Image (tube, helix red, strand yellow):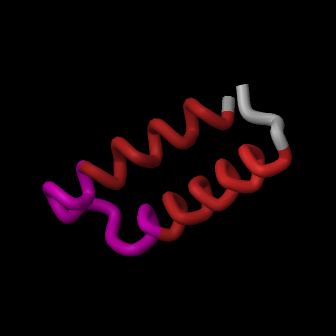
């Protein structure tokens, strides 16, 4: 589930860079998703 959310956020972020869609909100969400991913990797709960 987390991986799906991260992939969706990365795709939306890439579309935002290309088409200037979403503004700063998508960047904030992407940073939050990356922080959660790093924390899970450090804790050893990655798939």
When the figure is inspected, residue 25 is found, relative to residue 16, above or below; the finding is below
Residue 3 placement (x, y as % from top left): 60, 33
The quarter of the picture where the N terminus appears is: top right
Q: Position of residue 22 (x, y in %)?
A: 33, 63
Q: Nearer the viewer, residue 23 or 40?
A: 40
Q: Is residue 22 magenta?
A: yes
* Label total for image: 0
Q: Outermost residue toward the left?
A: 18
Return the x and y of residue 26 as percentages of the image width and height: 43, 62
From what the image shows, is residue 1 above or below residue 6?
above
Q: For the point 47% across and 37% down, which residue is it?
A: 7
**32 and 26: which is toward the camera:** 32
The magenta stretch spans which residues? 15-27
Side of 44 where 30 appears, left or right: left
Residue displayed at 76% across by 46% down: 40
Foreground of the two, 6 or 24: 6
Q: Which residue is situated farthest in the bottom direction here? A: 24
Image quarter in which the C terminus is found = top right
Q: Which one is in front, 22 or 18? A: 18
Residue sitting at x 75%, y 55%: 39
Q: Is residue 43 left or right of residue 1?
A: right
Q: Is residue 14 left or right of residue 28?
A: left
- Residue at coordinates 21% horizontally, 60% vertically from top-left? 17
Which image quadrant for residue 46?
top right
Q: Main secondary structure of the magenta part?
A: helix
């Amino acid at each position: 589930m987390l991986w799906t959310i991260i992939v969706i956020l990365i795709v939306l972020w890439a579309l935002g860079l290309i088409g200037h869609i979403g503004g700063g909100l998508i960047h904030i969400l992407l940073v939050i998703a990356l922080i959660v991913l790093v924390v899970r990797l450090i804790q050893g709960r990655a798939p």
